[in-house]
Image (tube, rainbow, N blue to C red):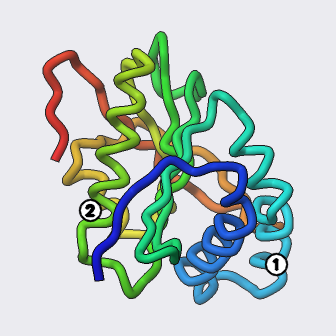
């Protein structure tokens, strides 16, 4: 089945909320308590929350769509500083998730490309992200793109403070993305 990437619209808030929660649970439920997962999902996912994110002019959201079904999404937050990333115009790769049946089909790579292009278009000089220290698959993916470790921060899942590695990618004028 073919798929495409498009910019998210307000009408996508409910479908995005469902995909965001489903992919987050799929990625992390086995390593967290149900209670902590429920708390995190209530705080970060839901149609109203995603509608607010979609309305935020500093948030860029793109969706991977296969025949009307959302299969992945990526979100970039512009002008989002973090202490360990020295940048005049930083952007955060806020979320990048793909439904498990679509892993290995270049969906994440294409979403990454679209978001990095958006960051460059906004004149961001660096993009950073937080990735759970116990997520080697994601860490390998980000390293392959060119991200490097720059520090860490605490990322709470419910009531469980966890360590994320902060990774950064410099966006030079001649930078080519995979």
| Image: 77 above or below 51 | above
Mark 2 and mark 1: span between their CA atoms?
28 Å
Q: Position of residue 164 (x, y in %)?
A: 54, 54
State the SS at label 1: helix
Is residue 130 visible in the rendered structure shown here? Answer: no
Q: Quadrant of residue 58?
A: top right
Which residue occupies the foreground of this view, 62 or 88? 62
Residue 19 numbered mark, or none: none
Packing grade of label 2 (10 A; few <14, some 14-19, many >=20) is few
Secondary structure beneath dot 2 equals: helix
x 72%, y 66%: residue: 157
Query: Nearest the camera: 159 or 117?
Result: 117
Are circles 2 and 1 on residues that touch, CB within 8 Å? no
Q: Is residue 166 above or below residue 118?
A: below
Q: Residue under circle 1?
A: 38
Q: In the shown orientation, is residue 149 left or right of residue 165?
A: left
Residue corresponding to mark 2 = 140
Extreme top residue here? 88
| First reached walking from the N terminus: tag 2 or tag 1 | 1
> Could you tell me residue 148's position as x and y percent?
30, 41
Identified at 74% across, 85% down, the residue is: 33
Please tell me in which quadrant of the rendered image residue 137 appears.
bottom left
Between tags 2 and 1, which lies in front?
1
**x and y percent of residue 65 in the render?**
45, 68
In the image, what residue occupies the spot 38% across and 22% down? 121
Q: Is residue 14 visible?
A: yes
Q: Position of residue 17 (x, y in %)?
A: 71, 66
- Quadrant of the snapshot with the N terminus: bottom left
Left or right placement of residue 34 versus residue 94 in this view: right
* Badge 1: residue crowd in 10 Å (few <14, some 14–19, many ≥20): some
């Amino acid at each position: 089945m073919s798929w495409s990437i498009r910019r998210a619209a307000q009408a996508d808030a409910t479908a995005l909320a469902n995909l965001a929660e489903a992919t987050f649970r799929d990625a992390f439920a086995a390593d967290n308590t149900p209670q902590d997962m429920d708390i995190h999902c209530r705080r970060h996912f839901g149609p109203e929350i995603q509608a607010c994110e979609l309305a935020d002019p500093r948030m860029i959201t793109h969706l991977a769509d296969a025949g009307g079904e959302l299969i992945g999404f990526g979100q970039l937050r512009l002008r989002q500083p973090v202490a360990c990333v020295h940048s005049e115009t930083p952007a955060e790769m806020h979320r990048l998730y793909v439904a498990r049946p679509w892993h290995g089909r270049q969906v994440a790579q294409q979403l990454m490309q679209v978001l990095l292009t958006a960051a460059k278009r906004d004149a961001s000089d660096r993009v950073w992200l937080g990735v759970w220290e116990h997520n080697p698959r994601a860490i390998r993916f980000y390293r392959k793109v060119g991200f490097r470790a720059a520090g860490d921060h605490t990322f709470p899942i419910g009531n469980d403070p966890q360590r994320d590695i902060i990774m950064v990618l410099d966006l030079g004028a001649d930078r080519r993305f995979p």
